Amino acid sequence: QGKVLREAIAASPDMGKMLGGEEEKDPEAEKEKEEERQEALRQEEEERKAKYAKMEAEREVMRQGIRDKYGIKKREEAEAEAQAAMEQASEGSLTRPKKAVPAGCGDAEEEEESIMDTVMKYLPGPLQDMLKK
């Protein structure tokens, strides 16, 4: 009986699958399925991007209507105008615009040098020579 069953399984691959036998895996078919799956994912991603681009375009139209209604400028335009105003203000200057630095907040090296100069003034000559070296 077992021998007849094995012969039947060997004779018909479909019967082997039905009885719980191993499927013969075709590498070409698996490769095609994987390629189809990848293509489907790419297509879905493109459709999603197109959908969101369309939604963003609709939102931008709505935003522009609000800007026009209330006289508001776009951020990029406002920043560009502010930058142009800064460049125009410093146009005649040869140096960059000064930064506001409060007195006493300058470089620490400058303060140390002035303190050392002050101390050196009050030291006797031989000590000044030793400290200079």
Image (cartoon, rainbow, N blue to C red):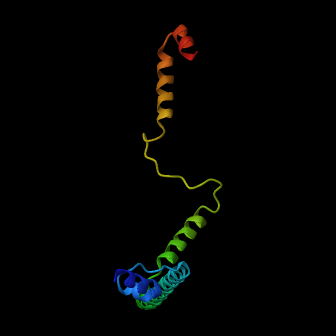
Q: Residue at image x 57%, y 70%?
A: 84
Q: Quadrant of the N terminus?
A: bottom left
* Residue 56 visible somewhere in the drawing: no
Q: Is residue 85 above or below residue 19?
A: above
Q: Is residue 77 above or below residue 15?
A: above
**Quadrant assignment, res 7:** bottom left
* Residue 8 visible somewhere in the drawing: yes
User: Can you give x and y, in whole percent of width and height, for residue 100 in the image?
Assistant: 47, 51
Say which of 17 and 73 sits in front: 17
Q: Residue at image x 52%, y 80%?
A: 26
User: Can you give x and y, in whole percent of width and height, for residue 11 in the image?
Assistant: 47, 87
Say which of 64 and 116 sits in front: 64
Say which of 30 and 85 sits in front: 30
Q: Is residue 11 above or below residue 116?
A: below
Q: Quadrant of the C terminus?
A: top right
User: Can you give x and y, in whole percent of width and height, for residue 59 in the image?
Assistant: 42, 88
Q: Residue at image x 46%, y 26%?
A: 115
Say which of 57 and 35 sits in front: 35
Circle count: 0
**Quadrant assignment, res 12:** bottom left
Q: Residue furthest top?
A: 126
Relative placement, left or right, of 131 versus 71 is right
